């Protein structure tokens, strides 16, 4: 998902945005590209970074939204290729 979409989810859930959470989580994309989710994309890393907080929940929502977004993309590709 794009950061704008993550932030829209933040606004719905919290009434405010946590742009810095999403930026921190996705920063490794600058040097890892699509494989960036091997870093900063686990509940434990988020808990260590943010403790029990709204930021933690925003990060967990980021993880789940990414999973759903990726699954939808894979499904579209499979349907497009008739598999």
Image (cartoon, rainbow, N blue to C red):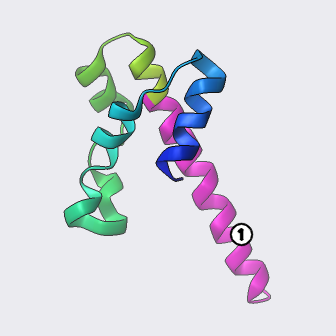
- The residue at the point 24 percent across, 24 percent down is 49
Give 24 or 78, whichever is nearer the viewer.
Answer: 24
Quadrant of residue 69 in the image?
A: bottom right
Query: The magenta stretch spans which residues?
Result: 59-83
Q: Is residue 61 above or below residue 77?
A: above
| Residue 28 within the magenta-colored segment of the rendering | no
* Residue 74, percent from left and from top: 64, 70
Give 26 or 16, whichever is nearer the viewer.
Answer: 16
Quadrant of residue 8 in the image?
A: top right
Q: Quadrant of the C terminus?
A: bottom right
* Residue 7, percent from left and from top: 53, 35
* Residue 79, percent from left and from top: 78, 79
Q: Is residue 49 above or below residue 3?
A: above
For label 1, the residue is: 75
- The residue at the point 64 percent across, 59 percent down is 71
- The residue at the point 19 percent across, 65 percent down is 31
- The residue at the point 63 percent across, 21 percent down is 13
Q: Is residue 47 above or below residue 8?
A: above
């Amino acid at each position: 998902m794009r950061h704008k979409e993550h932030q829209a989810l933040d606004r719905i859930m919290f009434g405010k945005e946590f742009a810095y959470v999403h930026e921190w989580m996705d920063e490794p994309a600058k040097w890892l590209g699509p494989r960036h989710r091997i870093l900063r994309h686990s509940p434990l890393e988020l808990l260590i970074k943010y403790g029990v907080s709204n930021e933690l929940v925003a990060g967990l929502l980021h993880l789940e939204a990414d999973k759903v977004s990726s699954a939808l993309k894979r499904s579209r590709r499979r349907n497009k290729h008739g598999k």
